[in-house]
Image: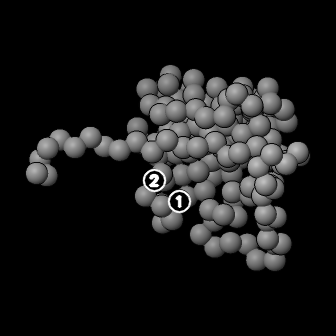
Amino acid sequence: MDLRKLQKIVVTALEDIKARDIEVINTTKLTSLFDRMVIASADSTRQVKALARNVHDKVKEAGAEVLSIEGEETGEWVLVDLDTIIVHVMQPGVRSYYNLEELWQARPKKGLPPAPLPAEEGDEGSPPAAPRRRVTRKKDDGASK
């Protein structure tokens, strides 16, 4: 599926369930793992899960592939892997803590204080661990031997 069409489906799916602060970051010059990162905020764990599920459903309806969804158990940060687009749906506190926008911008914004160091594992009040993206490798067809 065309990247622009897939991106439009994702953003529309997020807007349908009232996601806040939707940001699309072009990552083509930063990594070869994916071309776009979409980040959105939700006000509750229920809304985080509903947004991620709506993205999943709308992408499937359009005939595109969803590789995985990570983080639905807690609902504080859900990652939807669409191969060329990675979608992060986060509660505002988690989004502020990890500050993915600054991390993935080609030119970081100046004047922002550095993000605090993560708390040691087991500390109360520490933000949840980031969902892990599964990296899928293309199968070797044997032609390179």
Figure colour scheme: one colour
Q: Which SS class for mark 2?
A: loop
Q: Residue at 35% of width from left, 44% of height from top?
A: 137
In the image, residue 6 sits, relative to residue 99, either above or below, namely above
Percent across and percent down for residue 113 are 83, 72
* Amino acid on which disc 1 is placed: Thr
Q: Which SS class for mark 1?
A: loop
Please indicate, yes or no, whether residue 61 appears anywhere in the rendered image: yes
Marked residue nearer the N-terminal end (2 or 1): 1
Neighbour tally class for label 2: few under 14, some 14-19, many 20 plus, Cα within 10 Å: some
Q: What is the distance, in whole Å, between disc 2 and disc 1 at their CAs?
A: 9 Å
Q: Is 103 positioned to the left or the right of 34 in the image?
A: right
Q: Is 2 positioned to the left or the right of 105 in the image?
A: left
Give me the disc on residue 33: 2
In the image, residue 8 sits, relative to residue 30, either above or below, namely above
In the rendered image, the residue lying farthest to the bottom is 111
Q: Which residue is mark 1?
A: 27
